[in-house]
Amino acid sequence: MPAPFHRRQGFTLIEILVAVSVLVVIVLICGQAFEAASGVARTGEASGDALQEAWLIQSQMEEDLSSISSDGALVIHSVEVPNDYNFKNWSGDGVRPGLIHPNLPASAPVRCDQLVFFKSGFEQTRKLGDTAFDQMTGVPRVMGGASMITYGHALQFPELSDYSIEAPSVEEVEDSLLGELPPQYRSHDIDFKANRYARQDLQSRIGPFYQWNVSDQGDWGGDGARLTTKYTVNGFSLGGNQLYSQSDGPEIRGNQPDATRWLLARQAVAMGDDDGDQPGGNDYPTDASKRIYRNQAFAAETLFPADPRRRSSQDAGFDLVVPVIDNGRVDIASMNMGAIREILLHSRSYDNPDNTFARRPWFGNDNPDGTHAVLEDVRSGSQPPEGNDGALPGQGTQQDLLKSLAMWPRAERHPHGVNRYDQGLTSHVLSTGCSSFIVEWTWDDDVAETRTWQRVNPSIADGRLNEVTWPGMRFDPAGVSDTDLESLGIDALPSGRHIWFGMPSMTDGDDVDPDAPGQNDPPQFDRRVMSFSTFANRFPGLNQPYGTPDWQFPDVDKPDLAAPSLVHPGAIDGVVADFGEPGETVREYWAVFGPNRRWPLLEDVDQMTGGGNPDGQSFGTADGTDDPDPSYTPWPTALRITVVLHGPGGDLENGKEVQFVVELPRDRLE
C-alpha cells in the first residue's frame, strides 16, 4: 500500500530569504530607475526654466537697448577672477574659503561683467517705503523722462538688519543677530562711501565673489577686516534736511554666496528734475532742497558718487555724496540728461565757476585744441576719505566719471522684513542662479568711415577743396595669418564675419604664453576675444585720408584688416594691469563709449601735423584737413551676451550656457 501524500503547508526559511532578497534587489533597481528618471525630469525642467529665464533676460535687454539714449554713454566693465582666487588669497583668519564656483576646475575663469547705459522714455519708480504718517504704505510712484540702466550681478548681505519703522526695544536689540538694530526710520547699509573713496578712482571693490578674509594687492578682498556698516535715514518723518544722513553701525563679514547662487539684476534708476535748481544748495547734505517732486519720493541727488557741478557762483567741485543708489533702495535721481552732459562735457573753476570753465578731457592728455582742462577739486566742507589729500577723484576725465557709475547694486533673494522698503530689494532681480555674465561688443565693417574736405592751400581761406575719405573699420577673416593670431592672443578666429572685442582670452595660468611661437601649450578658456586696443595696435588705421573726388572709396582699395583711422587706439578700452602671480589675480577690462559718437574731427581746427595719426600729432604746420578729436568713440554695432544659468531651484549643477546678440539701433546712434 503506497505511503500517504503530505501537502507542504508553507515555505522554508531559505526560500523566504531568497524571495525577500530578490524583492529587495527589484525594489532597489526600481528605486534607482525612478530616481534616475526623476533626476532626468528635474534636470529637464530646470533646463527649461533656465531657457525661459534666458529668454526673459534677452527680451528685457532688447527692449532697453532699442531705446538707448544717444545723449548719454555706454560702459562695459568686465571682471574675471580665477575660481580658486579666494582659496589662494586667504589671509589666514576665519574659515578657509573654497572655490567660487564649486563645480568648476580650480583654474577656470569666473566672469561677473557690468553693462551701464542711458535709456530714453519714461521709467516708473518701483521702490516703496514708509510715509510721514509711519504707515507701511508706499511712497507715491513717480516717473522720470529717462533712466540709467545697469545689468550685472547683485550683492547679497543677509547679515544686514531689516528696515526699522519703529524704534526697537531693549529686548529686540538684545535678541537681534548682531546685538544691534537700526534706529527708527533707518535702513542698515554697507558703508559704500568709505569703500569707494578708499580709491580715488571711486571704483567699488566689493565684488560678487567677495570674502572678508581674502586680500591681494588689487583690494578685492576684505584684507582680514570686516565690512563697516551705516544706518541711513530714509524717512521723511525726521525732516527733509536729515534724509540720507548716516550714523555708524556694527561690522559684518559680508561674504557672498558661491557663484551658483549669484543674482543677476537689472537696476533702473529713473531720472527726473522738477525745479532746475543747482544740486544740494550750499550746505549739502544737511540742505536737501534738491529732491524730486518737493520731497514726495526718495531720490538720490545725483547718479554720480562724486558730483562736480556748480553749487553757487563761488563754489564748484566734487561733492562726496552718500551713494544711496548702491544700497539698492533708491531708484530715482534728481537730474536729467542735460545734467549728464553738463557733468561730462564741461569743467569749472573751483572758486570761480561762473567765469572760468573749460572742456572736460575724454582721457588723460586729451587736449588737442588747447581748451581742455580739469579745474575742479574736492569741495570745502565735503570730507575726503582718510589718507586722501583732497585731490579730485581719478583724473576727473569723462572716462573717470563714467567708470564711477559702474557698480554691483544690492539685492536680496528674499526680503529681510515685512515692510515694503525691504521688499523693494527683490524687485530688480532677473535670475536667482547666474554664475556668469559676459558682455562683448563689435563693429560692422566701415564703422567710423568719414568723408570730409581738405583745403589744398591752407594759407588761403577760400582755397580749392578736395574731397577725402578717412577709412573705417575693416575685418576680413581671410586676411588673418597665423602670425596675426599669435599677436592678437587668440587660438583661432571667431565664427562669422564679426570680430568680438572684450576681455582678452585667459591662458591656463602656468606662466607660459600658449600663443607664443614654439610653445606646445594648448590654451584654455580661449573665447577668441581681444581688446580693441590690441587690434588697433596690430592693424592701425590708415593715417592719411584717401582722395575720393567722386565720393567713392571702393572696397577693393580698402585693407582687409584695419582699425578705424579716426579712433584713437586708447580712447575706448583697456585691460587693467594684473597684480600678483598668474591665477591669483582679478583681471579687469573697460570699454567706455562717451557722448561723442558721431563727430570724429575737430571743427575748424587745423593746426597739427601727423596726418591724422592721434599719437603723432604736434603743433606745427597745417595740413589742410581738420584734426581728429581724441574723444571720438563710435558706439558698438551689437553686444554679445553670454550667461550661465542654474534655474530657479539651482538644479543645474554646472549650469546652462546661453548666448545671444543684441543689435543697437543704428538710427539712434548715427
Image (tube, grey):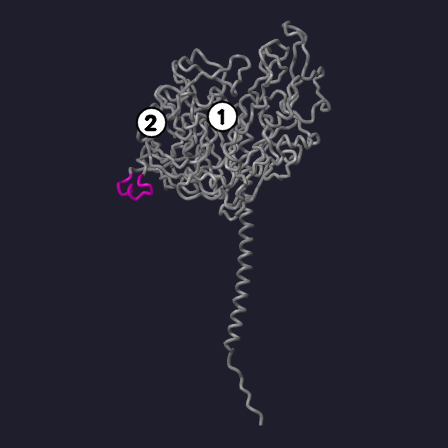
Task: Say if 172 sits above or below 556 in the image.
Answer: below
Residue at the extreme left of the image, as rendered: 170
Q: Find numbered disc 1 in the image and state the secondary structure of the residue it sits on.
A: helix
For the N terminus, the quadrant is bottom right
Question: On the image, which quarter does residue 640 sit in?
Answer: top right
Instruction: Look at the image and say whether residue 290 sits in the magenta stretch.
Output: no
For the C terminus, the quadrant is top right
| Residue type pointed to by label 1 | Leu
Instruction: Look at the image and say whether residue 171 sits in the magenta stretch.
Output: yes
- Residue 442 % position (x, y): 61, 30
- Residue found at x 56% / y 56%: 37
> Residue 240 has which mark?
2
Question: On the image, which quarter does residue 459 sit in?
Answer: top right
- Residue 448 % position (x, y): 62, 22
Q: Nearer the viewer, residue 378 or 555?
A: 378
Q: Count the labels in the image.
A: 2
- Residue 548 % position (x, y): 70, 16
Q: Earlier in the sequence, mark 2 or mark 1?
A: 2
